[in-house]
Image (spheres, rainbow, N blue to C red):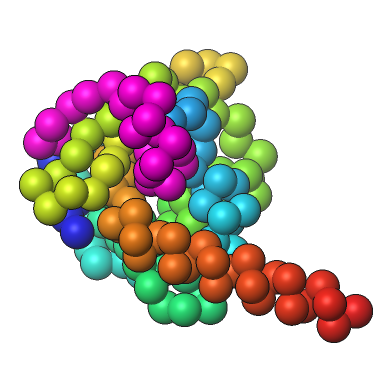
Amino acid sequence: MSVTADPIRAFTPNGPQLASSLSLRLLTHRGLMTPRLKAVFGAMRAEQATTKQGDEGLTRTSRLVSIATGHTILRAKLHIVDTHLPVSLVQQLCETSELFGQLLHDHDIDVAVAEPQLFQTPDGCFGRTTTLTEAASNLPICDVIETLSHDDQLAVIAKQHTLAKSQSQQAY
């Protein structure tokens, strides 16, 4: 699975594609991925591959990993305008495994999400690019490239989460 700066094949999925692909159903919305992914896969952490400070902000490349299974759910590349965010959020982003969407929520930052552009990588993974802005001021916060793992792997992780959730509910 790859994170790509240039989406390989942009497209708009049709009804049958949406019905058969968990990835496409997860990607086709104008919102943060964090709440959707947590609902389907449970708790996750961001494993950072790189964090670089540049003249135009911070670039964070990471993969979101299921805490329960250790499997990669999503790879993300974030180009963050750190001057438009609280210093404490940026520090947490660089020093913790917390998800960016969760940090925005924790810091009460209301974001607007631009219409995502979907793409498919050469190895068959689906992803999206989008831009986050601060909802009230429309200041840019982040350009995002998100690439989900293959649907078959995602289905296994989702099933394991559903089973674990069902077992914990039965225990009570």
Q: Residue at x 28, y 41 (%)?
A: 127
Quadrant location of the C terminus in the rendered image:
bottom right
On whether residue 8 falls in the magenta region, the answer is yes
Q: Residue furthest front?
A: 16
Residue farthest to the right?
172
Q: Above or below — where is 103 with respect to 168?
A: above
Query: Could you tell me residue 138's position as x and y percent?
Result: 47, 17
Determine if the magenta segment contains residue 25.
yes
Which portion, as a residue range, is magenta?
6-27
Query: Which residue appears farthest toward the bottom when viewing the image?
Result: 171
Q: Quadrant of the N terminus?
A: bottom left
Q: Is residue 94 visible to us here?
A: no
Q: Which residue is pictured at 47% across the width and 79% down the height?
A: 69
Q: Quadrant of residue 62?
A: bottom left
In the foreground, 70 or 48: 70
Q: Position of residue 83 (x, y in %)?
A: 39, 37
Q: Which residue is at a point 24% across and 67% down the rendered structure image?
A: 49
Give the left or right position of residue 59, taking residue 167 as reference.
left
Q: Is residue 111 left or right of residue 129?
A: right
Q: Is residue 151 left or right of residue 29?
A: left
Q: Residue 32 at what x, y percent from top left?
A: 51, 38
Front-most of residues 155 and 148:
155
Seen from the viewer's position, the closer of residues 53 and 17 is: 17
- Work out which residue is located at the far top of the displayed protein and give it: 137
